[in-house]
Amino acid sequence: MNLTSQQSSTYGRIFQAAVEAIFSNILQQLAPRDPPLLARRQINGIVGLGLPDNQWQNEMGYFYSITMAHLQRAVVAYGAGGFAANTAYINVSNDSSDRWLCQNLVIRGTSHKSFSLFALILALIVGLLIVTTGTTIEDLIYWCQGKSGHGISKQEEWTANELLMMQSLLYERDDCGV
């Protein structure tokens, strides 16, 4: 193959990660602490329910997702350096193509989030408009009706029939005083 040094380095890392991601290797790592079988989750003690007819397909899909996650982890661990309690154990490459691979590996992290300032401001403005409209619409309609002369009697009836006004009228009727 006629590969550049950067392509060769990338190919070597992916091939090494694929070898590490062979399922038998992953199974040996997982089996002692957590058997990676979905069917085991349906067993309580020694009693379990029957398995669905497509259980083998579910298991294969689960095994595939474990293998792909391990493959991705192996590639990212190479570029990110992994975790070492002592930095003396970190292997720093002197090869320019390996350094290029590490510097150009793009990894989505959870430490930083990207957001759109325009969307944030737009959401703030829309929210303020909704709150302002909700608090002022009754007074605005009353003011518009006063200017046009339409609906003034309905507004006065609305004000007279308010809950507190009705309660006040009932107290006055029963001579309870208000």
Image (cartoon, rainbow, N blue to C red):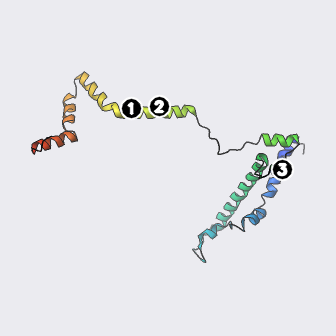
Question: Quadrant of the image for the C terminus?
Answer: top left
Closest to the observer: 93 or 175?
175
Q: Which residue is mark 1?
A: 132
As drawn, 97 above or below 156: below
Q: Amino acid at mark 2?
A: Ile
Q: Which residue is mark 3?
A: 88
Label 3 near label 2: C-beta < 8 Å? no
Residue 41: name its quadrant: bottom right
Looking at the image, residue 108 sits to the left or right of residue 101; the answer is left
Which mark lies nearer to you, 2 or 3? 3
Label 2 and label 3: CA atoms lie apart by 53 Å
As drawn, 99 above or below 37: above
Residue 129: name its quadrant: top left
Q: Which residue is mark 2?
A: 125
Which residue lies at the image location 33% right of the left edge and 31% below the top edge? 137
Label 3 near label 1: C-beta < 8 Å? no
Secondary structure at badge 2 equals helix
How packed mark 1 is, by other alpha carbons closer than 10 Å (few <14, some 14-19, many 20 or more), is few
Label 2 and label 1: CA atoms lie apart by 10 Å
Which residue lies at the image location 14% right of the left edge and 44% below the top edge? 171
- Extreme residue in the bottom direction: 46
Question: Quadrant of the image for the N terminus?
Answer: top right
Looking at the image, residue 152 sits to the left or right of residue 17; the answer is left
Marked residue nearer the N-terminal end (2 or 3):
3
Which residue lies at the image location 22% right of the left edge and 26% below the top edge? 150
Closest to the observer: 15 or 70?
70
Secondary structure at badge 1 equals helix
